[in-house]
Amino acid sequence: MESSTDLTRRGFIRKTAGWMLSSGALAVAKDSTVSWPSKPLVVACRDTLVKGLTLGQVQGLIGVTGVEVEVNPELFCPNLEHPQKKYSLATPSGIATLKDDLSKNGLVVTAFLMHNRLDERLAEELAWTKKLVAAAVSLEVPVIRIDVVPRRTQAEEFLPFAIKACTKLCEIVEGTRINYGIENHGSITNDPEFLRQLFAGVASPHLGLTLDTANFYWYGHPLNELYEIFERFAPRVFHTHCKSIRYPDDKKNVHRPMGWEYDRYACPIYEGDIDFGKVVAILRKANYRGDLCLENESLGKYPEEQDAQILKKEIALLKRLAVAGTATPKQAT
């Protein structure tokens, strides 16, 4: 979605922490009918979902072992909490502090997130990225999620610019294991043809996709065309945003206006139209080794006291799929 919901608007995690720990809320359902691969995918979440928690609380209260971390141009991590300090990647000591705190608490950063403005300030963006890549190498963060959207450039002129800018970004990570995941969102990168031409024009193995499962659907692609799009780009997927939408039956398999009724129909992944068993099976077939990163933009629709239960059920579903070698039922039980 392109107009973000404040996912931490009510500080629900702190208010429900006792319930989550005492009730076994993070128990994961097991399915004896599926096979088990040698290496499960990491289940992660956007750092906006754990804002208000310290790193020491994240795994116990939320149940994830991975976090996608937003980094601003000053190299601060604005959504990571600590009672005495702010996390910064601007200095070697700051990087070492975050690395130590992550290790102590059994967490990994599965991706950094940048809110890029490439066509407004390309030189500054490249300088910022160069510093962030150095931090990613030190922290062994494999992916940097990026925005490739026109802000000042006309749509018809944006593809040549995007190829140029992404080529320069890829030059920064040459010789490293760091990859970029362009998030499909907005009116440009939800267009499969634009993505195809961009990837072909840059021709770098370091440039791929942060697959936002709901954004292609938000854009207007029919449900029965989504999985072909996922399959087409699965070899390019480095990172994910797992979220869903539940449209009325007569709107699922038709082309809809971009963003049609998103605020009304956005929902938790276990209630949505997108079959995450199929999604994970498609990614597995393409040898995906990234994360399953939860994003929820629907919490504002529900009473505050339901927030923890909703996230717990979403994470349980992703955990089951993270270890499943074959497609499993869409709904968590």
Image: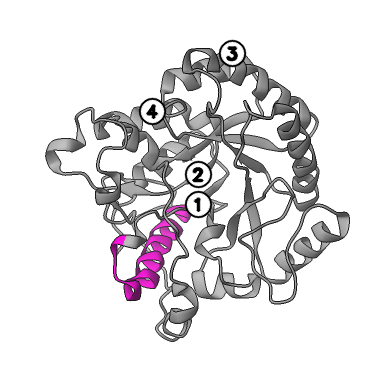
Left or right: residue 134 compared with residue 107: right
Secondary structure of the residue carrying numbered label 1? strand
Do the residues bearing badges 4 and 3 touch, measured as CB atoms within 8 Å?
no
Position in image of residue 306 (x %, y %)? 32, 72
Of labels 2 and 3, earlier in sequence is: 3
Residue at label 1?
A: 293
Q: Nearer the viewer, mark 2 or mark 3?
A: 3
Nearer-the-camera pick, 296 or 328: 296
Do the residues bearing badges 2 and 1 touch, measured as CB atoms within 8 Å?
yes
| CA separation in Å, label 4 and label 3 | 23 Å
| CA separation in Å, label 2 and label 1 | 6 Å
Residue furthest out toward the right: 92
Residue at label 2?
A: 240
Of labels 1 and 4, earlier in sequence is: 4
Secondary structure of the residue carrying numbered label 3? helix
Of labels 1 and 3, earlier in sequence is: 3
- Name the amino acid, label 3: Pro
Q: Nearer the viewer, mark 4 or mark 3?
A: 3
Looking at the image, residue 199 lies above or below residue 176: above
| CA separation in Å, label 2 and label 3 | 26 Å
Secondary structure of the residue carrying numbered label 4? helix
Left or right: residue 210 compared with residue 82: left
Few, some or many C-alpha atoms within 10 Å of disc 3 (few <14, some 14-19, many ≥20)? Answer: few
